Image (tube, rainbow, N blue to C red):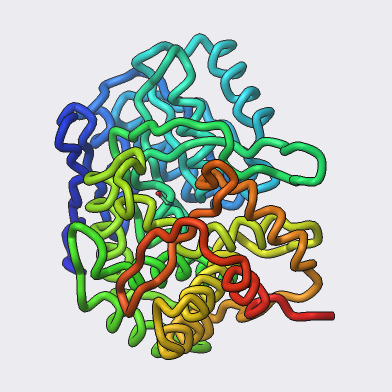
Amino acid sequence: MPDQPLSIDVRFPLGPARSYEVVVGDGVLAELGSRLSALAGAARCLLVADSGVPQGEVERAAASLRAAGCEPVTRVIHGGEAHKTWDAAGSLLSDMAALGLERRHPVVALGGGVVGDISGFVASAYRRGVPFVQCPTTLLAMVDASVGGKSGVNLPGPPGAGTLKNMAGAFYQPVLVLVDTSVLGSLPLRHLRAGLTECIKHAMLCDSVPRRDPGLLESTRSALRAWKGVRPAGAPLAELVARNVALKASVVAQDEREELSGGGRALLNLGHTFGHALETAPGSTLLHGEAVGLGLIAAATTASALGLVGAECERLTRELVEHAGLPLEVHGLAPADVRARMAHDKKVESGRLRLVLPTGPGRATVVEGPSEDAVITGLLAVLRRP
Ligand code: GLY
């Protein structure tokens, strides 16, 4: 990783006005105010901070905004999927109206994926859209959620369906993403490890994306081996972040709204149909990244049961998840409950499941209507019976 911040462009072919920079580097949060004022000079903004972010980081962001002539109004909200609610978004929108914020006044998200998703949704809706800035503070938000403009909240489902993830939302691109890798030093280890799942997912797709990074699978494997039992940190972590951001940026620039058939952005859902179901099943205490790690194993096992890959792909997936320090199985969840939740996935069409499955190391595809036996084999690979 160079000493200078690295700038990665997200360029949409049909919409240069919506293209933006993702700036990755140690300490770039201090540049928030000057970079924002160059893009959207405004006298006020709403700074939505995650309650898990150390106060010092919130003050650093606020001071940078003030120094650039932009007075922040700070609102602290909780991260964690249980807080990603319509009420949380509504309460921020009511506050913005009560504060008299205007259309030029940006919303700045400082936190993990949940805070970014709610803030983006609020920015898309307030006065039909105000400028939005992402300052992700978790590894997961840095390499995945903050890039690409997916925003939204969860909704309660019909009886028995539990929470429906991201069921209300919008594609709403930020004007700027600032990825300050120094913030990862204070992230709790469990959350840091959970974020590695999205890096594993990208590594498993590195040959199927527009900006191919064929070495990413091997580099990720070596990095995870080196971090087995030790906290990921330093230049190797910052470099992994930058490569993952570049890969994600290339995918969303090609297929912003997940419309390409058989690939494109939909591939980023590898492991997520299983993962979301494991995360929201009754009794689950898994973090999103932990559930997706299990989802990657379930996807590789399903692909093997369908004959798309050999057993070595399943072994490699398990190895990556294990070396990341993530669970390889989960206790106490009923297979029927998890399978029922998969039926509520947003990608289900006319009742048919659509799964992203690996087709080889670094490659994946969308499979329509996989056999039920193969899906159950995948699930049972990660559900530990009582
Ligand atoms: N997290 C998957 C996507 O942004 O499409």
State how many labels appear. 0
Residue nearest the observer in this picture, 182 or 330: 330
Residue at 35% of width from left, 67% of height from top?
A: 364
Left or right of 17 on screen, residue 95: right
Residue 15 seen in render: yes
* Occupied quadrant, residue 330: bottom right
In front of the other: 140 or 247? 247
The one nearer the camera, 23 or 297, is 297
Q: Can you see residue 184?
A: no
Task: Give the residue drawn at x 62%, y 76%.
Answer: 377
Residue 110: x, y in percent?
Answer: 47, 43
Q: Nearer the viewer, residue 317 or 113?
A: 317
Quarter of the figure with residue 91: top right
Position in image of residue 225 (x %, y %): 41, 89
- 367 vs 209, left or right, is right
Vertical relation: 15 (above or below) 277: above
Query: Quadrant location of the C terminus?
Result: bottom right
Residue at (26, 21) in percent of width and height: 41
Residue located farthest toward the right when viewing the structure as drawn: 386
Residue for point 40% across, 47% down: 146
Establish if 163 lies above or below 332.
Answer: above
Q: Residue 143's spot in the image, x, y percent? A: 37, 58
Q: Which corner quadrant holds the N terminus?
A: bottom left
Q: Position of residue 142 (x, y in %)?
A: 39, 55
